[in-house]
C-alpha cells in the first residue's frame, strides 16, 4: 500500500492545513533577535533559510511534475530533509562539501550565500539554484556539475564536490580529503582553516564506505593527527530518530570522533548543533559526526509509512517557528510558499528547452582525457630536471650511486628506483600502503621513506581506506601512488575505484579530477604459494571500468617507462591508473636458461627517458626466427613463458612474433591487428580465467577489426587458484602454450 505522503497533492494540502491553523502571538520578535529563546539563530536568518527550504520542497514537486510527462529523469527526494539548510548556514561558503542525494536545501543555501554569477539578491540566487538543480533533473547540458550526464549535487563555484556512489561510498574520499588538507604540499583550492563536510543517510551506516570513513576519522582523531572532517548523518527512522537509537549507537562512542545529536526537523536546534560542531572541527582540526533526525516524505511504494511523524515536517516546523516569533503570519507563509512554487515551476519550464547530450562523443568527452603528447612532454621535463637542477638531490637520494650505474636490475628493483625518481620529480607525490615504510609485502618500496619521510607512510591494510586516502589526496592536488597487498585486496575497494575514482572527471564534466596510480602485486604464481587470495587472477572487474588505465609490465625493461607514463598521465590528465605487477616475476633473473640474466635490464638514465617512453596503449613486439608463422598475444607472466615456447618453435623451424600487450585497458588494438594480420594465426595466452578474462577482449578486438585467419586461446580454468602444485592444473603453462601453437601451425 502506498504511504500517505507519496503524492505531492497530499503533502501540499497537509502543509496548508497545518499553517492555516497557526495563531500569531500578540507581540513579535525583531528580525535581528534570536528566533526563539536559547538559540543563536536570528529571525532574519531563519526567514532566509525558510525560503531555501521552500525552494527545496517545490523542487521535489517540480521533479515529479516533469516526470509525469517524461521530461524529468529524476524525482528528487529531499522532502523531509530540508533541515540540512541549517547545516549549510552554519558553514562557510568555502568549506568543501560532499552531499548525499537529499540535499536540495543545503545546495540552495550555499548558492544563496555565494554571489556567483552576480545575482543581485537572495531571491534571484535561489531561482538560479533551482534552475541548476532542475537542469540535472532534465539532463540539460547546462547542468553545472555533470553537464547532463546524471543528477548529482555538485558545483565547483560553490565548493560542492559531487558524491558519486550510493550508500556512503563518498565518505572515504571525504576522510581522505580532510587528511590531505592538513599535509604539507597540497594544492587544494580551499583555505588553510577550511573543514570538509560530508552528509549521508542512516542506511549508509551499514555500508562499507561509511564504516571505513568513521574508522579512518576516528583513528586520525584518536592518534591526535589533524582531520578537519564533519560528517552529517541524516536519519530517517520512521518512528523518529533519537539519541538513543541504533544509528546513534553506531555513531557515538567511537574513539577520536566527537558525536552530537539534534532534531533536523527543528531549524533552530539543527542550526545550533551544526554551528557548534563546525566550530569544534574548525578550531580543533579534529573530526566530528552530527546525527540529525529527519523524515522521508514523498516516498515510494513500499517505503515505511511516516504515520504521526508527519507533524514533524520541517517546513511546518519552520513556519511554526516564524509565526510564533511574529516574523510572518500564516497567510504570509502560504503566500510565500505559493510565490516560491511559481518561481520554481517557471524555472522548470525554462530548462525544458535546454539542449541535451546528443552524441556518444559528447557523452564520453569528459570521461578520460588522453593527451599523449603532453604526457610525453611531462616525461621529458622530469628527465630534464633530473639531469639539471635535481641532479645533486638525486645523487644524494641514491646514496652516491645512481641506479643507472649499478648494473642490470630485477623488476622489483626497477620499480623501486622509479618510485624514488617520482618522489624527487614531484613534491606532491605520496607513496603509502600497508608497511610501505618497511618495503611493503614484496620489498619493492625498501628505503623509500628515507628520501621523503613525510610523503612515504604506512596506512591501514583495508583497500577502501587506502583508496579513500588516495582520492582525497588527488582532490587536494597531490599525486597519490598507493600500494595494496595483493589483487584480492582490491575487490573490497572496488566501489572506490569504480564509482568514486574512474567517474569523477566524467560526472563533473572535467571540473574535478583524482589523479591516481594504484600499484597492485597481481596474477598467480605457478606453484600456488599462498592459495587463492595471493594468487587472484581475476581482472574482469578492472577491465570493464570505463576510462580506467590498466598497465601490466612483464619485465624490468618495461616497468620503468610504463610507470613513468602512468605517473605523467595522472599528473597531466588526471588519469586513474592501476599498475599490475606480476608478483612471481619480481625477482626473476633468467629467461631461457639458468644464469643468462636476460630477464634483467639496466635502469635507464634520465637522458634516455624520452627515447624509451612507452605511450599508453602501445604493445611490445618480439620477433623470433622468421616471425612469419604464428603470432602469440600475451601479457604478464605469459610473456616469459611465450618467449620460451617461441624460442623452441624457432629451433624447430617455425617463426613467431610475441606481442606483449603491456596495457590491458585500453588494449593496443592497432598493434594487435597489425601483428595478427602478419601471420594469419593468433594464439592468445591469457593467464586470467577463461570467462571474463583478457582473452575475451582480445578476441573481440580481432572480430571488430575484421581479422581474417585462425585464432586459438589458452587460458586459466574458471576456478580460484588452489594451493601448492595443484595450481599447475588450472594455470596456463608452457606445455599448454606449446600444444596450442602446434594446433594452429597444423592448420
Image: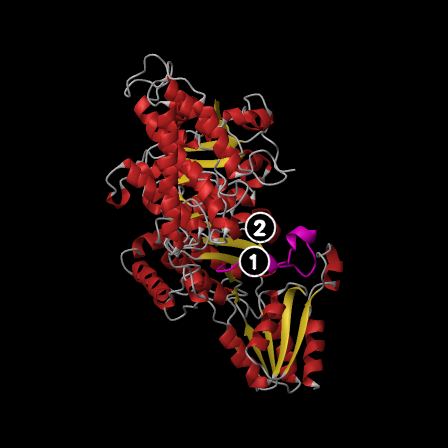
Q: Answer with mark 1 or mark 2, whichever residue precedes in sequence.
A: 2
Front residue (pair 71, 220): 71
Quarter holding the C terminus? bottom right
Q: Verify CB contact (< 8 Å) between mark 1 and mark 2.
A: yes
Q: Estimate the x, y position of residue 613 in percent, counting from the top left.
A: 41, 68
Whether residue 725 is visible to the viewer of this picture, yes or no, is yes
Instruction: Kindly identify the residue that appears in the image at 65 percent across and 59 percent down.
Output: 525
* Magenta-drawn stretch contains 350: no
* Magenta-drawn stretch contains 541: yes
Q: Estimate the x, y position of residue 536 in percent, counting from the top left.
A: 64, 55
Q: Which mark lies nearer to you, 1 or 2?
A: 1
Query: Disc 2 designates what residue?
Result: 490
Query: Disc 1 designates what residue?
Result: 542
Find the residue positioned furthest to the top.
Answer: 26
**Magenta region:** 522-548
Instruction: Kindly identify the residue that appears in the image at 43 percent across and 39 percent down.
Output: 58
Front residue (pair 641, 56): 56
Q: Which mark is residue 474?
A: none
Front residue (pair 483, 717): 717
Q: Callout 2: few (<14), some (14-19), or many (20+) C-alpha neighbours within 10 Å?
A: many
Amino acid at each position: 500500500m502506498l504511504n500517505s505522503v507519496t503524492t505531492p497533492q497530499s503533502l501540499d494540502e497537509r502543509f496548508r492545513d497545518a499553517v492555516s491553523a497557526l495563531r500569531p502571538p500578540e507581540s513579535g520578535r525583531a528580525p535581528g533577535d534570536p528566533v526563539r529563546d536559547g538559540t543563536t539563530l536570528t529571525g532574519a536568518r531563519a526567514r532566509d533559510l525558510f525560503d531555501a527550504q521552500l525552494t527545496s520542497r517545490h523542487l521535489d514537486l517540480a521533479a515529479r511534475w516533469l516526470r509525469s510527462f517524461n521530461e524529468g529523469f529524476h524525482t528528487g527526494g529531499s522532502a523531509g530533509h530540508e533541515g540540512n539548510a541549517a547545516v549549510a548556514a552554519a558553514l562557510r561558503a568555502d568549506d568543501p562539501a560532499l552531499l548525499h542525494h537529499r540535499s536540495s536545501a543545503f545546495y540552495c543555501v550555499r548558492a544563496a550565500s555565494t554571489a556567483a554569477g552576480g545575482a543581485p539578491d537572495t531571491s534571484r540566487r535561489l531561482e538560479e539554484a533551482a534552475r541548476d538543480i532542475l537542469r540535472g533533473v532534465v539532463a540539460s547540458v547546462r547542468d553545472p556539475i555533470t553537464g547532463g550526464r546524471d543528477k548529482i549535487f555538485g558545483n565547483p563555484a560553490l565548493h560542492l564536490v559531487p558524491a558519486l556512489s550510493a550508500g556512503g561510498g563518498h565518505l572515504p574520499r571525504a576522510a581522505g580529503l580532510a587528511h590531505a588538507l592538513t599535509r604539507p604540499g597540497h594544492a587544494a583550492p580551499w583555505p588553510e582553516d577550511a573543514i570538509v563536510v560530508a552528509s549521508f543517510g542512516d542506511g549508509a551506516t551499514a555500508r562499507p564506505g561509511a564504516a571505513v570513513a568513521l574508522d579512518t576519522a576516528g583513528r586520525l582523531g584518536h592518534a591526535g593527527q589533524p582531520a578537519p572532517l564533519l560528517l552529517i548523518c541524516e536519519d530517517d527512522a520512521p518512528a523518529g530518530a533519537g539519541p538513543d537509537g541504533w544509528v546513534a549507537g553506531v555513531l557515538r562512542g567511537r574513539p577520536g570522533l566527537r558525536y552530537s545529536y539534534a532534531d533536523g526537523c527543528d531549524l533552530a536546534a539543527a542550526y545550533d548543533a551544526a554551528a557548534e560542531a563546525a566550530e569544534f572541527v574548525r578550531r580543533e582540526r579534529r573530526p566530528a559526526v552530527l546525527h540529525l533526525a529527519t523524515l522521508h516524505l514523498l516516498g515510494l511504494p513500499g517505503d515505511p509509512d511516516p504515520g504521526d511523524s508527519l507533524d514533524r515536517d520541517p517546513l511546518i516546523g519552520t513556519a511554526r517557528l516564524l509565526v510564533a516569533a511574529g516574523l510572518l503570519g500564516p497567510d504570509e507563509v502560504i503566500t510565500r510558499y505559493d510565490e516560491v512554487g511559481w518561481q520554481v515551476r517557471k524555472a522548470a519550464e525554462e530548462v525544458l528547452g535546454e539542449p541535451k547530450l546528443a552524441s556518444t562523443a559528447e557523452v564520453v568527452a569528459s570521461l578520460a582525457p588522453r593527451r599523449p603528447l603532453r604526457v610525453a612532454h611531462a616525461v621529458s621535463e622530469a628527465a630534464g630536471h633530473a639531469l639539471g637542477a635535481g641532479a645533486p638531490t638525486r645523487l644524494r637520494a641514491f646514496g652516491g650511486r645512481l641506479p643507472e650505474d649499478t648494473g642490470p636490475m630485477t623488476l622489483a628493483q626497477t620499480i623501486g628506483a622509479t618510485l624514488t625518481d617520482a618522489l624527487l620529480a614531484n613534491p606532491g607525490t605520496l607513496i603509502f600502503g600497508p608497511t610501505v615504510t618497511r618495503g611493503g609485502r614484496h620489498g619493492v618500496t625498501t628505503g623509500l621513506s628515507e628520501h621523503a619521510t613525510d610523503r612515504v607512510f604506512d596506512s591501514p591494510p583495508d583497500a577502501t581506506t587506502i583508496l579513500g586516502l588516495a582520492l582525497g589526496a588527488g582532490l587536494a592536488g597531490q599525486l597519490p601512488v598507493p600500494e595494496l597487498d595483493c589483487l584480492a585486496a582490491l575487490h573490497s575497494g572496488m566501489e572506490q575505484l569504480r564509482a568514486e575514482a574512474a567517474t569523477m572527471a566524467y560526472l563533473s564534466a572535467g571540473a574535478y579530477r583524482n589523479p591516481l596510480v594504484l600499484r597492485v602485486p597481481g596474477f598467480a604464481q605457478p606453484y600456488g604459494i599462498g592459495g587463492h587470495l595471493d594468487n587472484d587472477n581475476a581482472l574482469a572487474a578492472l577491465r570493464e571500468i570505463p576510462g580506467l588505465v590498466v598497465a601490466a609490465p612483464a619485465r624490468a625493461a618495461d616497468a620503468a617507462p610504463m610507470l613513468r607514463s602512468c605517473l605523467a598521465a595522472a599528473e597531466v590528465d588526471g588519469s586513474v591508473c592501476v599498475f599490475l605487477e606480476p608478483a612471481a616475476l619480481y625477482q626473476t633473473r633468467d629467461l631461457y636458461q639458468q644464469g643468462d640474466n636476460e630477464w634483467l635490464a639496466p635502469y635507464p638514465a634520465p637522458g634516455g627517458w624520452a627515447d624509451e617512453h612507452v605511450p599508453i596503449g602501445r604493445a611490445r613486439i618480439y620477433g623470433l626466427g622468421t616471425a612469419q608463422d604464428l603470432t602469440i598475444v600475451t601479457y604478464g607472466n605469459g610473456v616469459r613463458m611465450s618467449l620460451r615456447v617461441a624460442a623452441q618453435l624457432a629451433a624447430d623451424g617455425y617463426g613467431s612474433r610475441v606481442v606483449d600487450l603491456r596495457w590491458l585497458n585500453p588494449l593496443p588494438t592497432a598493434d594487435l591487428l597489425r601483428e595478427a594480420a602478419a601471420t594469419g594465426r593468433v594464439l592468445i595466452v591469457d593467464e586470467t580465467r577463461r570467462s571474463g578474462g583478457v582473452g575475451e577482449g582480445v578476441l573481440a578486438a580481432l572480430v571488430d577489426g575484421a581479422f581474417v585467419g585462425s585464432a586459438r586461446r589458452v587460458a586459466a580454468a574458471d576456478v580460484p587458484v588452489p594451493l601448492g602444485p595443484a595450481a599447475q592444473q588450472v594455470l596456463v603453462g608452457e606445455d599448454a602454450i606449446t600444444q596450442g601453437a602446434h594446433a594452429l601451425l597444423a592448420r
